[in-house]
Image (cartoon, grey):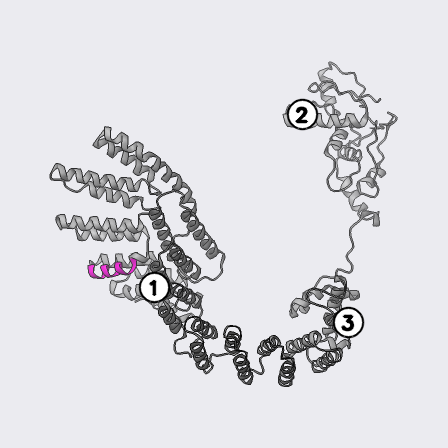
Amino acid sequence: MSNLVTSTMDKINGGGKTMSDKYNVETAEILANEAQHLPIAEATPIYEQLLQLFPTAAKFWKQYVEANLAVNNDDATKQIFSRCLLNCLQIPLWRCYIRFIRKANDKKGIEGQEETKKAFEFMLNYVGADIASGPVWMEYISFLKSLPALNVQEETQRMTAVRKVYQRAIITPTHHIEQIWKDYENFENSVSRQLAKGLISEYQPKYTSARAVYRERKKYFDEIDWNMLAVPPTGVYKEEVQWMAWKRLLSFEKGNPQRIDAASSNKRIIFTYEQSLMYMYHYPDIWYDYATWHAKGGSIDAAIKVFQRSLKALPDSEILRYAYAELEESRGAIQAAKKIYENLLGDGVNATTLAHIQFIRFLRRTEGVEAARKYFLDARKSPSCTYHVYVAYATLAFCLDKDPKMAHNVFEAGLKRFMLEPVYILEYADFLTRLNDDQNIRALFERSLSSLPPEKSVEVWKKFIHFEQTYGDLASMLKVEQRRKEALSGSDEDGTSALGSSLQDLVSRYSFMDLWPCSSNDLDHLTRQEWLAKNINKKVEKSAMPNGMMLLDREPTACISTTATKVVYPDTSKMVIYDPKQNPGAGTNAFDEILKATPPALVAFLSNLPAVEGPTPNVDIVLSICLQSDLLTSQSGKTGIPTQLQSGKTGVSTPLPAGPATSELSGSNKSHPVASGLSFKPTNNRPYGKRKDSERQEDDDTTTVQSQPPPRDAFRIRQYQKARMSSTSQTGSVSYGSQFSGDLSGSTS
């Protein structure tokens, strides 16, 4: 055996300490690939080790079988098939099985043919509902057609058998359903065209329904990773996706989309559950859903078998044992349920506290008070017994047995062992409160607080104070509050004593349930004060609390987690909301640099745009301004600076002022309101009409956007029309001339 295989097997056998090391998929794949190249004697222990960890890995079982088939080891092959077939409902493995059966019965004549036929029926009974089972159906049909027929009766029987298999196959939603339907039509027509017409018309709707269901079914199957190995859930995304995919497929099958009979539908659901367990083998919820589905359908025996299989798969799953015991108890099998609890408890040494408690409750339900009391006396001697067992049994005796004296004795007995458990003290105090035994409650608090260390006594002090606030007088309230401050003065658990008497004590005294003697703002302020009091002596970095602001900002987080004080937060005290009006000159120089690189025509165009409030301008107003603008540009040197803008009010041409444009674009002021009755007249005074070709080229450089004919795009035309209608309502009377001619004229009313 190679060193790689040896080292890999050592890793699987226990070289890894964690669950992820034990169920290492990559290591298992490497080991399986190496085993394929080894002699069967060396490969067998490798396969056995792999299949012990991955008992539902059909591909590993198939490799194991093929390795034995290669050396004609039929006995080992039969044994392997008996171990894996019913738990691995995968078509490639089952086709390997049918090949083995056909080979073994090939030369046995009629007896062998019957055995092969039984093997096919056995296979289709388990995996015939698989979406990939089409080749299996076709292979079975071919096998039946190949059977010899010595007389007419045998021929009729053979054709009848082939017809029945076809009719079963065409109502099964598989990948090959269309091919099988075509073959069936050809088969019926070859036998009898007259009979074929009636049979095909009868099964056509069933085939159509199955084909429609196949298309839906395929969507769910495509989401599943069929090469995945069954590993315990680790919470990674891929595992969760596969879990959801199986849940969706199960829900789809339970809905019976094909509307077939209940027996056939249940068979498909069972098949889907069995397939899902090949990949979700370590998921207790899948096992539980499978068992409860059987139980709800009335198949209690099937549900019990599923629970038994689940406990073999997950022997450490306590919750599945409770579910199994609950099922047995619900059907009246008390002894069977008791045996499950006893197996869970074992010898009592390794039993969990919860197991003791649940068994006590079970005995109380099924066998009565004495049985529960007897087991409690035994359970308290167990090393795994904690105060929870005492609390559970005392509560049981008080509420169900109506025996407060027994409950009191149990609590007193537990107090000797669990005096230093604050939770036990609180449970005991609640019990005494229900008895209205205020004298013993105060005695209990005094006894426990004299023994508990300060860091463990915080909750007990709170309970003591709450008791006095509810049932005591004012003097006892103030006395207990003062004692708590003195007792916890050196403890980090409660820092209220650092600031002496505080308003929190008063609020606590005069509040009830969700009713408070102050407003919510006051409560927030008090919460901040409480946190400040707890951290008043802690050194806080100067950078963490500029101007005292960051300390308050950090309070909500610190109340939730004590480690939040280590987080460094940004200094938000110097942050200001951006507003250009606060600093008019800010950014002007930088913006001037941008304007220098901006084309002059664009600068002139931007200077005519109206001021906009908010992030989104009114598109119609902007379009109307664009349509009314007619900027004339003339080449001045190499810069081409725009020389004229029309004043909408006076119609007089004025030079473009460079300074204001820059100022307005930089956001220093808000000018250029859209004036009512304002229209922009074109500056091009050349009469419209025919022009010489030499003038056309010159005018191309100075033609405005407004003088260009609108594009013949329907959407843009509608935008132009909408803008013009809006501008008409804003600017008075505007005449645009022909829509497509590009002739534009404006008049001011």
Image check: 634 left or right of 111? right
On residue 503, the disc is 3
Place of residue 687 in the rendered image (x, y in percent of width and height, measured from the top left): 79, 16
Place of residue 437 in the rendered image (x, y in percent of width and height, measured from the top left): 62, 79
Magenta span includes 180: no
Q: Is residue 279 above or below residue 471?
A: above
Numbered disc 3: secondary structure:
helix
Give how far apart the Cα atoms at labels 1 and 3 are.
Answer: 67 Å
Numbered disc 1: secondary structure:
helix
Residue kind at label 2, given as amino acid type: Ile
Image check: 220 left or right of 37? right
Q: Which residue is mark 2?
A: 717
Image check: 124 left or right of 444? left
Q: Which residues are magenta?
A: 73-84
Q: Which residue is mark 1?
A: 50
Q: Residue at x 80, y 38 (%)?
A: 611
Magenta span includes 83: yes
Q: Nearer the observer, disc 3 or disc 2?
A: 3
- Do tag 3 and tag 2 residues touch (Cβ < 8 Å)? no
